[in-house]
Structure formats: C-alpha cells, structure tokens
C-alpha cells in the first residue's frame, strides 16, 4: 500500500506535523506508540534476517518510515499488527518510539486473510512460509486452489508446487526455510518417493553439490552412478590443512571429503606400483 501516487516527503521525522498524534483514526493514517502495538498472531513470516533488519533500521534513521504499518485497534490503548512486522522490528532497532500506521477494522477471519495475502504479495517470504500461507488460506479461509490463485494472481501450479514442499521431511523443509536449499532442488527431491532416499539425496546435495537434474535422476538409477556437476563445495581451512599434512606425510595426492554430518572419506592417489609400495611401506612404519 502507498499513501498516494504523488511525490512528496518521506514519512517519518516530519510526520507529526502532517498527522494528528492525539488519537487514532480508523480508516486513516496516524502515529501510534510502538509500546501499544502487539504482534500479529496470524503472520506467516517466522524468520527475520538480522543483517537485513539492521540495514532497514539504518534507512529508517536516515529517511524515516516510507511505508506505514497496517494495524487494527482492539482497545483504546492497544493495536494489533496486520502487516509490517519487519518495519516494526527495524523501527525498534532504530530507536523509534512511534510509527506511522493505517488503522483498519478487521475481525480475526479477515485479519488472517489480509495478513497472509499481503505478506504473500509484498514480502520476500521463503518457499516454505509461502506454502504454509497457502495452506492456511485454503484450510482456514476455505479457498480452493483455483480461487486462491485468482485472488493473489498466482497460477494454480505455483500454489500446488509450494504446497507439495510441505510434504518433505522436516530437515529438508528447514533447509529451504533457511535458504540452504533451493526450491528447484526441493522440488526435485519430491520426485523421490521414499523418505529415507530423499534424505540421502539431500545429504548428497550438501556434500557433493548435486545438480537439480542429478537429483531428478536419483530414483531412476543407482546413486553411486550419478555424476555431480558444478563446482565442488568449498573446503574449510581445517580440511585443507589435514589434506596438506597427509600429502606431506605420504608423498602422494590426498583428497578428504566430509558431509554436513561429519561422515566422509579419504582418497590417496598413486600412479604406479612403485608409488603404491612406497605408500604401504610408509603406512607400515606408522
């Protein structure tokens, strides 16, 4: 939402000169004390990046809040957030004591709908949060996938794909939520019917940098025959140090691989029978 389409000064520092601060105005915009605002229990967003919040807070200190929050008044001195939790959190970090807000009348059902729809359309939700929002709109607001798609201008396939992500194991959903796994990889994991195999493929994505296509092939061939593509995962300084020490001790090329759970393997390469014999002699001396 925006106040209007005309250019004008940013809302924030000079807002008190433009808006009444003495009383809230349902249907209009006013300044509201942050201490009088409580969180929206229907907000689908559960994860906020602190670095991004700090950046927004710095912008708010410099320019004020450009986009007012949307609130509903539940008592003379109490408001509930409909949308704008990220701006509210950043305002608190910026040291503000009051924020500009639209005041609306909403019951719990319409508030849920407004919060979910506004977040889906305007906020950078991760794929899992979007899927959960779709699920709540369908279950609690009684929308069909087609009706929901029409309301939020999304295709039915987009809605179905996000809902399917909620069928993945919790560990994989958490990786999508934390932006450690792309939606493309997550959708590819859905092509694997067995949950244990999904988790194995997930670990292979982490440890071996499997491409989306390789994951799609997982259920069609033996995992050992699947080739990786792309750049290998960057090795930690500790792994590189261990590889260097082993290479120095053995006099041969050594590669150490380790996945997120600590499992891995050490590969020692030799180019002749003589190098193999020297390796065996070295190991026997150890």
Image: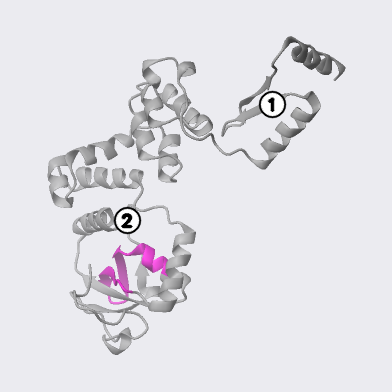
> Label 2, on which residue?
43
Disc 2 vs disc 1: which is toward the camera? 1
How far apart are the two marked residues, 2 and 1, measured between alpha carbons? 51 Å
Q: Nearer the viewer, residue 204 or 159?
A: 204
Label 2 CA crowd tier, 10 Å (few <14, some 14–19, many 20+): many
Q: Is residue 155 above or below residue 261?
A: below
Query: Tag 1's secondary structure?
Result: strand
Residue 138: image quadrant is top left
Extreme residue toward the bottom, this view? 17
The N terminus lies in quadrant: bottom left
At 35% across and 36% down in the image, what residue appears? 184
Residue 238: x and y, percent? 69, 39
Q: Quadrant of residue 258?
A: top right
Residue at image location 75% in from the left, 28% down from the top: 247
Q: Quadrant of the C terminus?
A: top right
Residue hosting label 1: 254
Instruction: Look at the image and name its color scheme.
Output: one colour
Report the front residue among 56 and 151. 56
Label located before the other in sequence (2 or 1): 2
Residue 65 lies left or right of residue 103; in this view the side is: right
> The magenta stretch spans which residues?
66-90
Side (left or right) of 168 relative to 256: left
Residue 108, percent from left and from top: 22, 58
Badge number at residue 51: none
Q: Label 1 crowding class (10 Å Cα cut-off): few <14, some 14-19, many 20+?
A: some
Q: Residue at x 24, y 58 (%)?
A: 118
- Front-most of 285 and 35? 285
């Amino acid at each position: 939402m925006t106040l209007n389409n005309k250019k004008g000064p940013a809302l924030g520092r000079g807002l008190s000169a433009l808006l009444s601060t003495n009383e809230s105005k349902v249907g209009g915009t006013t300044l509201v004390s942050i201490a009088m605002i409580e969180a929206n229990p229907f907000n689908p967003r559960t994860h906020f990046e602190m670095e991004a919040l700090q950046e927004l807070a710095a912008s708010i200190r410099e320019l004020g809040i450009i986009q007012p929050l949307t609130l509903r008044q539940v008592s003379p001195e109490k408001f509930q957030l409909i949308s704008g939790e990220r701006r509210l959190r950043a305002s608190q970090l910026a040291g503000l004591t009051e924020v500009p807000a639209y005041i609306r009348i909403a019951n719990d059902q319409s508030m849920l709908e407004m919060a979910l729809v506004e977040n889906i359309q305007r906020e950078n939700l991760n794929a899992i949060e979007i899927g959960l929002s779709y699920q709540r709109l369908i279950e609690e607001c009684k929308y069909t996938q087609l009706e929901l798609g029409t309301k939020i201008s999304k295709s039915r396939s987009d809605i179905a794909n996000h809902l399917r992500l909620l069928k993945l194991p919790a560990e994989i959903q958490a990786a999508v939520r934390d932006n450690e796994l792309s939606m493309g990889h997550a959708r590819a994991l859905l092509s694997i019917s067995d949950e244990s195999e999904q988790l194995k493929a997930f670990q292979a994505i982490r440890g071996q940098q499997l491409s989306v296509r390789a994951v799609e092939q997982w259920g069609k061939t033996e995992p050992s025959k699947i080739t990786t593509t792309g750049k290998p995962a960057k090795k930690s300084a500790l792994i590189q140090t261990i590889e260097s020490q082993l290479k120095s001790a053995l006099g041969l090329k050594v590669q150490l691989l380790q996945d997120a759970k600590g499992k891995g393997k050490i590969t020692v390469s030799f180019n002749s029978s003589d190098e193999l014999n020297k390796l065996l002699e070295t190991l026997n001396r150890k």
